[in-house]
Amino acid sequence: MMALDDIPVTQLKGVGNALAEKLGKLGIASLQDLLFHLPHRYEDRTRITAMGSLRIGDVAVVEGEVMKTDIVMGRRRSLQVTLKDHSGFVSLRFFHFNAAQKNQFADGTQVRCFGEVRAGRSGYELYHPEYQTHPTPMADEGSATLTPVYPLTEGIQQPRVRALCQQAVAYLKRYPIYDWLPPWVLVDYQLPTITAAVELVHSPPASASVAQLLEGRHPAQERLVMEELLAHQLSLLQVREQIQTRQALPLLPQGDLSERFLESLPFRLTGAQRQVLQEIRQDLTQPLPMLRLVQGDVGSGKTVVAALAALQAISAGTQVALMAPTEILAEQHYQNFCAWLAPLGIQLTWLTGKVKGKARAQAMAALSSGAAGIAIGTHALFQNDVAFDRLALVIIDEQHRFGVHQRLALREKGAAGALAPHQLIMTATPIPRTLAMSAYADLDTSVIDELPPGRKPIETIVVPDGRRDDVVERVRNACQAGRQAYWVCTLIEESEVLQCQAAEVSATELAERLPNLRIGLVHGRLKSQEKAEVMAQFKSGALDLLVATTVIEVGVDVPNASLIIIENPERLGLAQLHQLRGRVGRGEQASYCVLMYHPPLSLNSKARLQALRDSQDGFVIAEKDLELRGPGEVLGTRQTGMMQFRLADFERDQHWIEVVREIAPRLMGNKVAVQGLVRRWLGEKTRYGEV
Ligand code: ADP
Ligand code: MG
């Protein structure tokens, strides 16, 4: 039997090759694709608003009679049509128009239009409204319906898409959409069938609750949202399954490397570290690749846990790759790991994109011969020409800096060969639980939910930059008392050049004002050698004050630093600020974080800085971040377009996340259904699966 999948959009009236091509850009080829091009909101055009009661910003239907039509010269030539009704006037303004259009608006013509009210030259105006001359009578209240609004692509107008969808809806009578959800799900959660749901959202009947539809809470919408979240979850489980169809080496440690390492540490592991380590050790002894995410707040001590995981692999005679997102962080890990592991007789290799020539050849040889037990570096570790002898464990640190997409790509690269390596992913940004459940459905999760003992809370102070003098004084006092400080310059994130310049300017200014302090500068445009030197000086105490860009955001660990000044914190996300703040509070002395903002602050910024001042719990902050910024920003995936849903909304639809998490594994057995759902919602190039 034919299905909607098999019917091309060109079957519809008015769809020629040109339009079909444009629709193709939206991923729409078949009628089924079109029907799953869902309205993302509705407009209430059921009532006509009196012109006299319009307010700027209203999106409204108005209707009246043409009083006059003028072509107005000016900076841009425009057509201005003034309408009147019993209560007042409003003008329509068109910057793109033709003679025929002008002639439609003869004086006295009745016009109904819909658009947003702006303050224009002639008073209230609607720019390029949708309009209808000689309008058909409005449906009366009881039979009025909402108007769906669709996502668009260039060259297709809203009314066009709307009309096409209406045509496609008519096909549903003969060609219902296949319902992949098992009947018990529909019964348990009281959901309509997929066909009924799709039809309803494209053409909501007058009987449907307007309030529910506008809020996205109509059962038909709930059904679709749930199915979309389910499809995403299934696609991640597919990735997991795909990886776990491969074997991994069970890593059974020989000898006493771990014990010797633990004895060499100046501290004992916290209970949480031991617990998480236990989970990792258990995974590593399995013949299936470990897929584990370790979440732990800033300073919770993830690095030691990673080192112990690495030791298990090395003592089983295999190799480890440890990757960090930035050179500074990789460098710091390298130093730590050298100090920890070299005394145990383990050879370490350093590899980044900047390692070239002879050094690179040596590194590669150490890895391919198996002489090196562990390689530490940036994503250069996973370039195609890097070959390991027996790579069995891949550790990715601070992975929130990588998007979901990158994470999966990197993991795939690491997984070349007959045996898949075990994978340990560590993230310092605690992710709100619901978000974690969705974004990391392919991973098992461990949480280090305890900080090492003796940490003093960090006092956070929010001040306007008008008090810069006081802040500089504070830096002087702290450093004169033998402490160290960070001064972090932020700028619009996209411009690294500007950011570095800002840091240079600040460093110069601070050097003038604080002539007795030893001041270092580190930013992204320094050579890695230079960066490493400055960091090493700061770490050794040879520098009092480190002026830096946000390159120091992750991982940097200097316990004697007890003061951090962050300029223009309003430009950064909460999670990022929490990370930055986590650079201090690592030693015994009381620590301070000064957020020096540039007034005036927006309400949202004010709320964000307050949240930071009031909490030091990364999870609480992450929840707040999600609330204030939305999931795309929190996960740092806005650019990659991952975790972007057609309908689902993390805030609004949280209640489905746990349900979906429960249902998804039960559906995994039905391969056809999984494929069907994933293709329906994520498209051909099942985005997670094929990276
Ligand atoms: P993060 O989880 O942010 O990566 P790190 O691994 O950098 O944290 O650890 C932060 C600091 O705490 C380091 O100086 C580390 O040596 C120290 N540390 C880790 N575990 C403990 C512990 N159990 N007791 C005391 N200090 C610890
Ligand atoms: Mg770390």
Image (cartoon, grey):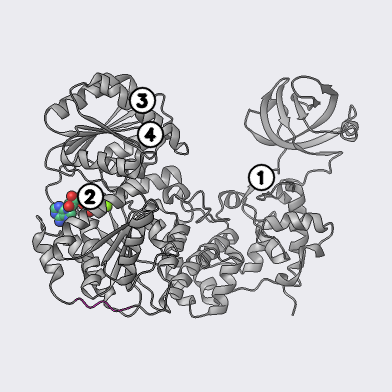
Camera-nearest residue between 409 and 245:
409
> Please, what is the three-letter code of the amino acid marked with disc 2?
Gly
Q: Amino acid at mark 1?
A: Glu
| Residue sitting nearer the eye, 534 or 289 | 534
Query: Gap between marks 2 and 1, in whole Å?
Result: 48 Å
Q: Nearer the viewer, mark 3 or mark 4?
A: 3
Residue 134 shown left or right of residue 425 in the figure: right
Quadrant showing the N terminus? bottom right
Q: Which residue is mark 1?
A: 43
Question: Which residue is pictured at 48% across the width and 52% down the height?
Answer: 652
Depth check, mark 1 against mark 3: the one in front is: 3
SS for dot 3: helix
Q: Which residue is mark 4?
A: 490
Single out the mark in the foreground, 2 or 1: 2
Q: Pick whichever of labels 2 and 4 is earlier in the sequence.
A: 2
Element under disc 4: loop
Q: Which residue is mark 2?
A: 299
Dot 2 or dot 1: first in sequence order is: 1
Query: Between tags 4 and 1, which lies in front?
Result: 4
Whether pointer 2 and pointer 4 mark residues with C-beta atoms closer than 8 Å, the reply is no
Q: Position of residue 207 (x, y in %)?
A: 67, 56
Q: Which residue is mark 3?
A: 505
Residue 284's spot in the image, x, y percent? 28, 74
Asked whether disc 2 touches disc 1, contact meaning CB atoms under 8 Å apart, the reply is: no
Q: Give percent across and percent down for residue 463.
A: 30, 26
Q: Is mark 2 within 8 Å of ligand 1?
A: yes
Q: Can you tell which of label 2 and label 4 is closer to the viewer?
A: 4
- Residue 136 counted in the magenta span: no
Circle 4: residue type: Thr
The residues tagged by marks 2 and 4 sit, at their Cα atoms, a distance apart of 22 Å
Q: Earlier in the sequence, mark 3 or mark 4?
A: 4
